[in-house]
Amino acid sequence: MSSSNASRLSRRGFAFGMAGLTLTAACGNGVGNSNAVKIDARVDATLTEMYARYPNTVEIANKSNGMLVMPLITDAGFIFGGAYGQGALRINGATVDYYSAVSGSAGLQIGAQQYAHVLFFMTQDALDDFRRSSGWTAGADIGYVVDATGDTLSTDTTTLRSPVLAAVFGQAGLKFGATVEGTKYTRIIP
C-alpha cells in the first residue's frame, strides 16, 4: 500500500472515530447537562437499582472505602467506537468529586447501548491512587461482582481481595461481556 493510501486510511479512521465519539456525546448521557444536582440524582437512582437487582453489592458497598458511580455510559460505534458518561465519587455516602469516563474501541462493530457501572475501591491505597491521578485508567486487575450470566458473585474473602471491584449493568439487565478495562476516568467540575 502506498504511503498516500495509508495516510488516507489513517485520516478516514480518525474521522470515523471522531464521528463515533460525537454520536456517543449526542445520546443523552449527560453531556451538556453536567450540573451537580442532576449527576447526584442519577447516582442515587443507579445505586437504588443496583442494590435491588444485586443484593450482594450492599455488603460490598459497606466494606468499600469509596465508590465511583457512573449512572449512564453511552457506548456507540461504527467500526470505531467510543463511550462516555459522567458520575460521582462517593465516600461514606457523600459525593466528594465528579468524574467523566471515556473509552474507545476499534473493530467490527455497529450500534449503540447504554449501561451503568460502579467501581468499589476496597482498599484505601486504591482509592488514594484513583484520587491522586490526573486521569486514571481501569486495568485488567479489576474484579467483577456480577458475572457474564447476570449472577452475583459471593462476597467471601476471595472476592473482596481485589483492590477495585466493578458492577456493570444495563437498564434492560446485564451488559454481557461488559468490562471497564481501558476506560479513562478524569475529574470534572460540573
Image (spheres, rainbow, N blue to C red):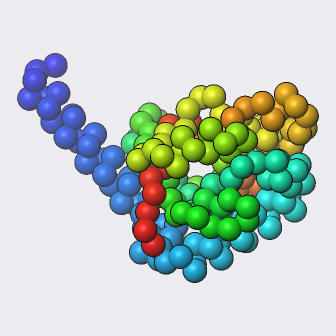
Q: Is residue 61 visible?
A: yes
Residue at 26% from the left image edge and 43% from the top image edge: 14
Residue at 58% from the left image edge and 64% from the top image edge: 96
Residue at 38% from the left image edge and 52% from the top image edge: 20
Q: Is residue 103 visible?
A: no
As rendered, which of 1 and 33 lies closer to the eye?
33
x and y, in percent, of residue 171 in the image: 71, 62
Residue at 79% from the left image edge and 41% from the top image edge: 145
Q: Residue furthest bottom?
A: 37
x and y, in percent, of residue 12 in the image: 23, 42
Q: Residue furthest top?
A: 1
- Is 10 rendered above or below residue 49? above
The quarter of the picture where the C terminus appears is bottom left
Determine which quarter of the picture holds residue 46. Answer: bottom right
Determine which quarter of the picture holds residue 158. Answer: top right
- Is 21 rendered above or below residue 132? below
* Left or right: 45 as drawn, with respect to 8: right
